[in-house]
Amino acid sequence: MRRVAAVGGTAVQDHVALAEIELCGELIIAASAAEDRLSLESIDEVLRVERQEREHRAQ
């Protein structure tokens, strides 16, 4: 006999995982809409990476 989780208020939400899933979805949409490969700058824009973080990463 299989047990199924009860429907209702027993679900645990992982807000970090949900945010990552949302960003992945946005990245997939941007990539599918692009005619060519996305540049690093385009990826950063989709993922909302701040300019200061990009500059620090480039060093």
Image (tube, helix red, strand yellow):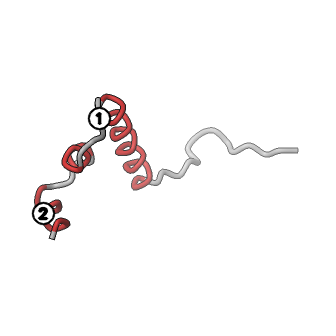
Q: Quadrant of the N terminus?
A: top right
Q: Position of residue 36 (x, y in %)?
A: 29, 34
Q: Which residue appears farthest toward the front when viewing the image?
A: 36
Q: Position of residue 7 (x, y in %)?
A: 63, 38
Q: Position of residue 34 (x, y in %)?
A: 29, 31
**For this view, does 35 lie left or right of residue 3?**
left
Q: Quadrant of the C terminus?
A: bottom left
Whether 17 is drawn above or below 34: the answer is: below
Around disc 1, counting alpha carbons within 10 Å, would you say few (fewer than 14), some (14 to 19), or many (20 or more)? few
Amino acid beneath label 1: Asp
Q: Which residue is under mark 2?
A: 55
State how far apart marks 1 and 2 are (Cα). 24 Å
Q: Which residue appears farthest toward the right when viewing the image?
A: 1
Q: Residue at x 34, y 41 (%)?
A: 27
Badge 1 or badge 2: first in the primary sequence: 1
Q: Residue at x 16, y 60 (%)?
A: 54
Amino acid beneath label 2: Glu
Q: Residue at x 59, y 40 (%)?
A: 8
Which of 22 and 52 lies nearest the eye of the viewer? 52
Whether 44 is drawn above or below 28: the answer is: below
Q: Which residue is under mark 1?
A: 36
Residue 42 in which image quadrant: top left
Q: Position of residue 39 (x, y in %)?
A: 23, 45
